[in-house]
Every structure is written in structure tokens, then in C-alpha cells.
Image (cartoon, rainbow, N blue to C red):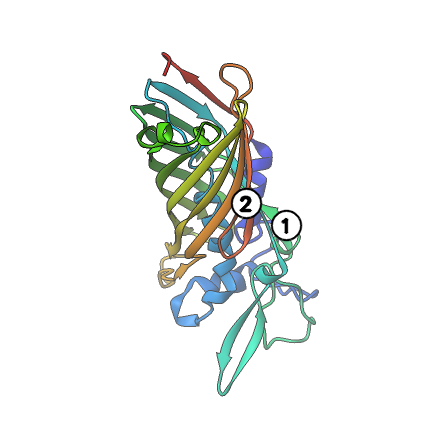
Amino acid sequence: MKNIIKVLSLFLMGAAITANATDSKGWATTDESLDAFYKINNRSGYVKPIIDNVGNVLNSNWYASASIPKSFAFEAGLPFALVPIASGDKVYRQKALLSTIELPTIFGDKGLPYDVSKIYGNETLNSLPLFTYPYLQMAFSYYHARLVLRGMWLPPISELKGFSLLGIGAQYSFGHLFQKQLPPVLQTLDVSVVFGYSSSTIKYQPKTHNGPLVLDLTGIIADLVIGYKPIKEMELMLTLGYQYANMESSGKRNVLSPDYDLAVKGNCGFKFGFEVAFTLGNSFHPVIGFDYSGKSSFTTNILYFQQQFGKE
């Protein structure tokens, strides 16, 4: 749990640096980074990698199989996605007069200490190799339909003043309608549709501020999942779909400061993925995979369990 809290704190504007201080090494100060969450400053590209990474986390791990049994089943686990911080997360392009210039993002590198024409990356965020956070997830299925619930909550700790995540999803499989008409070798083929909605809120308040920055992050997916079991204990899945991700800032630093008011969309559009699910024993059901939607991420649904009541 301490590692989870540390990653969240580091991810949010670098709790290790001192607000308002002049950084002799060319890194952005906390206030310089927080200024990007004002719409008027026109620096949405500076913070866009935050929702690009969080969006891929929120929109992952909604299913563990393309097939849903007719009999009642219960699932529970602790899935999470691993999203590498790539070179594309460290720079963004912005129009300037008649040209386009390349600028550092909040994950970007440091600059020269005497160059005040740019706001550079946050030293702590620049050192992160990947982003992740886990959540608790459970699901109930019956008559080939599945309801998914997920969530996570952390109490205020240091500069991380709050963290919560809630999500709900639904899945329906169609294999029972056509499997018997297929050749025997293909009768383990199944197709399902999946919808998922996640909402996460993160509150970050430097020690020098009287109020927090509040980030409301939203993720939505609509997927078509095609699964095939070459053997009883393993299922191969191909995913094609659409995802949406959005981040909105609110809150204020103190009584006299304006409200944070920036809205930024993340990786929105076509997504695809490959997953492999295993059935080990009566209930252990780990899943690993790869997704791509604007950037790569790896799904790791290792600690996942399913208990089915009754036989097909």
C-alpha cells in the first residue's frame, strides 16, 4: 500500500519538490506545473500525458473471458495495467505565430537553469518508468450476461489529500447462439460485447497551498471480444473497440486565486488488444495481455478468481 501511495503522489506534480522555489537545475517548480491547469495559460499539452496514461489504466481489465456461463458465477480480483512512460509523453507541439514548436511536458526533461522561456518537466515525474494503480474488482454473471464493479479508495496522506475510483461495466456473450452450428474444432469460439465506465478523483495539495488541485478523470470503453480456446485451460482473445478518456481540473490554491478550470481529452478512439486467459484449477483465472490505444499498455490480471455454481 505504501508503494501505491508513493506512485500516486509522485505522479501528481512531484511532492518531493518545493513550491515557489527557484530550481537551479532547470526543472519546473510545483507552481509552474500547477499553472498548466488554468485554461487561460493554454498549456493543455503540458499535462495531457497524465490523462493519456490514466485513461489507459481506467479502460483496461474489464473482462477475463469472451465466454460467460449460463449458470451463476462470481469473480473477484485485483487487476491493474502497466503503462510505460514513453518518449512521446515527454514532449508536445504547440502553434506559435507561423510555426509549430516542440515543448517539454510535465514528464519532460530539464532545461538550462538560465533559460526562462520554457516551463520544463517535473524532476520526479521525469524519473517514472511507468504508471499504474490497482483497484478491487468483482463481477457477477448469469445467463451469459455479466455485471462488473470496481473501486478503490485511499485516505488523505501527506500532500495526497484524496483518491477514489469507481467503475461499472457490462458484458454479454453470443456463443451459445451459434457454437453448435460450427465445426467441432471451432465450437469453443465465442464473441461478446463489453461496456465499461470508470471515474476517478485525485486531490493534491502542496504544503504551501491552502486549497487542493482536484482532478476528475473519466474512462469509457466499448469493446468487441473474440475468444477461442485451443485447450480447456487456455483462451486466446482478440479485442477491437473504442475508448474515451477525459480529465477536468477544479479547486483553487487559496481564497484569492482563480479556480482551476482545464479540461483535457486523453487517448480517444480505436483500440485493439491481445489477451491470454488461463483456467488453473476450479477458481484461479489469471489473464495477461497487451492493449494499444494511442500508446501501449500491458494488462496484468494475475490475482483473479472465479467461482461457478452449477454446470452448463
Location of residue 300 in the rendering, given as x and y in whole percent from the top left corner: 56, 35
Name the foreground residue: 72 vs 78. 72
Residue at 55% x, 45% y: name it: 9
Residue matched to label 2: 9
- The amino acid pointed to by label 2 is Ser
Q: Secondary structure at mark 1?
A: loop
* Residue 266 position within the rendered picture, expressed as x and y whole percent measured from the top left: 44, 57
Of circles 2 and 1, the one toward us is 1
Assess disc 2: are there few (<14), some (14-19) or many (≥20) residues with their C-alpha within 10 Å of its C-alpha.
many
Camera-nearest residue between 301 and 202: 301
Q: Is residue 68 above or below residue 34?
A: above
Name the image quarter holding residue 25. Answer: bottom right
Q: Mark 2 and mark 1: span between their CA atoms?
A: 12 Å
* Image point (61%, 62%), residue name: 108
Looking at the image, is 272 positioned above or below residue 301?
A: below
Q: Which mark is residue 272?
A: none
Disc 1 crowd rating (10 Å Cα; few below 14, some 14-19, many 20+) is some
**Residue at the front extreme of this rendering:** 183
- Which image quadrant is residue 286 in? top right
Depth check: 132 or 14 in front? 132
As drawn, 207 above or below 3: below
Q: Quadrant of the N terminus?
A: top right
Residue at coordinates 49% horizontally, 38% vertically from top-left? 237
Residue 12: x and y in percent read: 52, 50
- Give amino acid for label 1: Leu
Residue 128 is tagged as 1
Dividing the picture into quadrants, the one containing residue 230 is top right
User: Quadrant of the image for the C terminus?
Assistant: top left
Q: Is residue 226 shown above or below 23?
A: above
Q: Is residue 193 left or right of residue 105?
A: left
| Residue at image coords 56%, 60% | 106
In what element is the residue under mark 2? helix
